[in-house]
Amino acid sequence: MMTASLMIDLANKHMKTLESEFKPLTEAGKLECLIYNLLICNFSAQSRYDKNKIDELNFDLFGILISDFKLYVDETDDDKIGELIESRFKNHFKDIVMILDEGGFDPNDSFWYMYRKPLTYEAVGEIDPEMMAKFRPVLEKMSKALLEEADNLPD
């Protein structure tokens, strides 16, 4: 059965693909990538578990993420940190869906928050097309490998 700690282990394991095949992340960027990868794990869990199990899993994940975020943001209010995490789920959601459905667009939000302005609410700015051309295939590779591994976990 997938647990919050197992999801975090998988998310961190697959983050190494992005760092080794594209470029290293800052510590704050790693938190952004962790959120992205946890959302992918959550997609897998939602297809396998009932609402009560998903709610329990998400509660555990939010607790761990909020603790980790407190190391890198000035904010100490759990609700405000939770709002930032939820905003990232919304930002990354469309990128993940398009990547997993093999849609033809660039994951600008994910790149921006992982590499340019991690842990901020700053609006996505201009991204060099050459940089995106290098980033997208690696993000796609990481995303698909993570989803496959999460889907193949025993229940």
Image (cartoon, helix red, strand yellow):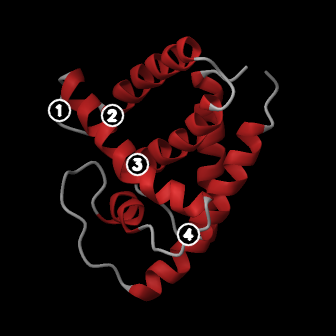
Query: Residue 58 at x, y = what percent?
Result: 47, 22
What amino acid type is highlighted by mark number 2? Phe
Q: Are marks 3 and 1 in contact (CB under 8 Å)?
A: no
Left or right of residue 132, residue 82 in this image: left
Q: Are marks 3 and 4 in contact (CB under 8 Å)?
A: no
Query: Residue 121 at x, y = what percent?
Result: 19, 51
Q: Are marks 2 and 1 in contact (CB under 8 Å)?
A: yes
**Quarter of the figure with the N terminus:** top right
Q: Residue 107 is drawn in which quadrant?
A: bottom left
What amino acid type is highlighted by mark number 3? Glu
Neighbours of disc 2 within 10 Å: few (<14), some (14-19), many (20+): many
Which tag is nearer the camera, tag 4 or tag 2?
4
Q: Which residue is mark 3?
A: 32
Measure the alpha-carbon separation of dots 3 and 4: 22 Å
The mark that comes first in sequence, 4 or 2, is 2
Q: Which residue is mark 2?
A: 69
**Residue at 36% over, 84% down:** 128
Q: Which residue is mark 4?
A: 103
At numbered mark 3, what does the secondary structure look like: helix, strand or loop? helix
At numbered mark 4, what does the secondary structure look like: helix, strand or loop? loop
**Quarter of the figure with the C terminus:** top right
Which tag is nearer the camera, tag 3 or tag 4?
4
Measure the alpha-carbon separation of dots 3 and 1: 16 Å
Q: Which residue is mark 1?
A: 75
Measure the alpha-carbon separation of dots 4 and 2: 31 Å
For this orientation, the residue located farthest to the bottom is 130
Q: Residue 131 is drawn in which quadrant?
A: bottom left
Measure the alpha-carbon separation of dots 2 and 3: 10 Å
